[in-house]
Amino acid sequence: MALALPAVDRNPLNTGLLDVASRLALMGGWEVDLATRRVRWSDAVCAIHDLPPGSSPTVEEAIAFYPQGWRAKIRSAFDACARDGIPYDEETQIVTAKGRRVWVRAIGQAVRDGQGRITHVRGALQDISRQKEAEGEAVRAHQRLVHTLETMTDAFITLDREWRLTYINREGQRLLRRRRYDVLGKVLWDEFPEAIGTVFEREYRRACAGNDPVTFEAHYPPLERWFEVRAFPSEEGLAIYFHDVTDRRHIREALRRSEERFRLVARVTGDTIWDWDVGTDTMWWSENLRLTFELDPATMPSAAAWSERIHPADRPRVRDGLTEFLNGKSNAWSTEYRFARADGSFAHVMDHGLAIRDEHGKAVRLLGAMSDISQRRKLEDDLRQAQRLEAVGQLTGGVAHDFNNLLTVILGNAGAIMDGLAHDPSLRELAELTRTAAQQGAALTSRLLAFARRQELKPAPIDVRELVRGSESLLRKAAGERVVLDIQSRPSLWCALIDPVQLEAALLNLCINARDAMPRGGRITIELANHSVTERGPDGETDVTVGDYVAIVVRDNGVGMSPEVAARAFEPFFTTKEIGKGSGLGLSMIYGFAKQSGGHVRIESRIGQGTTVTLLLPRAPSGRSE
């Protein structure tokens, strides 16, 4: 492009402004007198060449400042201008007097005289080194950006406002299975019509409409791949990053299914599964912790919290055993202890764990299962108690039977002696004492035989409510004045198949025991209700035959018994009363009577909270008590 140089302006103000503009633009003027072939440079041009002001070289000397590679081009352009008046505008380099390489813009045009002859060539020279440096940096920045986009692991595409693809990097070509030169300039929806109406189109349009970036994950059926996409709107259109997350989705789905199977297995087994990270002391519990012990897993986030729920008597043993296991080399750990439920009661549990150790043998993680074996322990305890009572009953029954035969002889002989000693008072008195002692022995053997289930019973369908009402006055007298007797009966009570005489004796015995447990007075409650036992054995009735029963519950608010004492309550001759105040046969007789009748008796007691005895009597085959 030709630059028309203005005529010299002699106005000082204009000249000053031109000097300022020249310095700011790093540009100066020059003129060649073709007759003398001398070049007149402005001070700015001299400065560009690192020459003092006023320098005036020849044309050849001026051209010599251009490097060899550019020199012929500038000479040719100057000659064409001087000969034919062709203007020129070239960007090239010069080597200054100080050896600096400077980028310059050389502009020249012909000047003609009145006859149209070219007499001068006038032009301008501008230092454009900074511009070239900026252009070079822009080019390098663009190259770095392109290199980054081409080597990044994410696919990257850009769209203009008309949804035309303006760029696609190497990874984008690979994932989309399209070459860039086949899609650049094409409309996205024309090239990928399957995306129309999908989450891809909805999110892209939403990003452009709201001018907000969007992030989403979606499946693209034609490629059978899942993509995680981030789209950023700009003035030019949309920049989209995406990468293939198909494998991650498959892994995540497999993990989800594995975790779901783990949860189902954990629930099906009935055990409470736990996972302990030893290093961070964090524990995970399966949902069975809530189902079995009514505990929220969040309340036991650590082994320390778990340890606090172990029975104080078991805690040192369990802690010491676990510490020894962690410091050892075994991979399996197992122990049994009592564990506190949410309501404060203790369950017997069996805990198993497997250790995951690092390369140094240090346990870093434990995975285990805690089983509630309370029912099994009760079954075992009930079985041992039943076996013990059975053995004692067999022994007691045999001894009582033989002893009863001896007492029969003694009573018979004592009667005969008394008849023969009618006239000797002293001997008759001895015989009377002998018979009385024998009668007491017979009563004792009767109780023993009742415990051994060898007494003669006369069961009949009995209205239990009427029997209790008929015995109420006797029971109140036995309870005493300081004890309140409360009798409660449910409606539609079944009849029981039971010996009424033995039942009345059992009730009297229970009231006397309850009275003795309340030396300062209290309350005895007798509840009558229907009771059915299923095959599952609810309430711990593990040795009760499945069927229907009439339940008689005798409850007091006395001193209660410890678990150890309650466990032996039905044993013959076991008593906590003072010597001479109890034979220890009352509850054992009731136990034998209930078992011989086809029923059951159980006892529940806590220190300071009283005792409850439940007598289950078999239901009579017909009839209800209204």
Image (cartoon, helix red, strand yellow):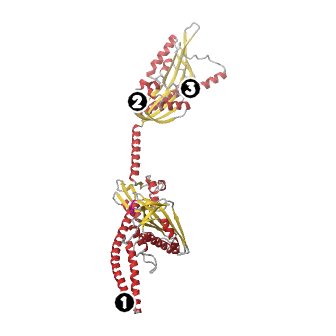
**Amino acid type assigned to the residue bearing label 2 in the image:** Pro
For the residues labelled 3 and 2, say whether their Cβ atoms are less than 8 Å apart: no
**Residue named by callout 3:** 26
| Span highlighted in magenta in the image | 542-546
Q: Quadrant of residue 350?
A: bottom left
Residue 420: image tag: 1
Residue 545 lies in the magenta stretch: yes
Q: Position of residue 122 (x, y in %)?
A: 55, 16
Element on which disc 1 rests: helix
Principal secondary structure, stretch drawn in magenta: loop
For the residues labelled 1 and 2, say whether their Cβ atoms are less than 8 Å apart: no
Q: Position of residue 58 (x, y in %)?
A: 51, 18
Q: Of discs 3 and 2, which sits in the foreground?
A: 2
> In the image, 38: left or right of 402?
right
**Amino acid type assigned to the residue bearing label 1 in the image:** Gly
**Residue named by callout 2:** 222
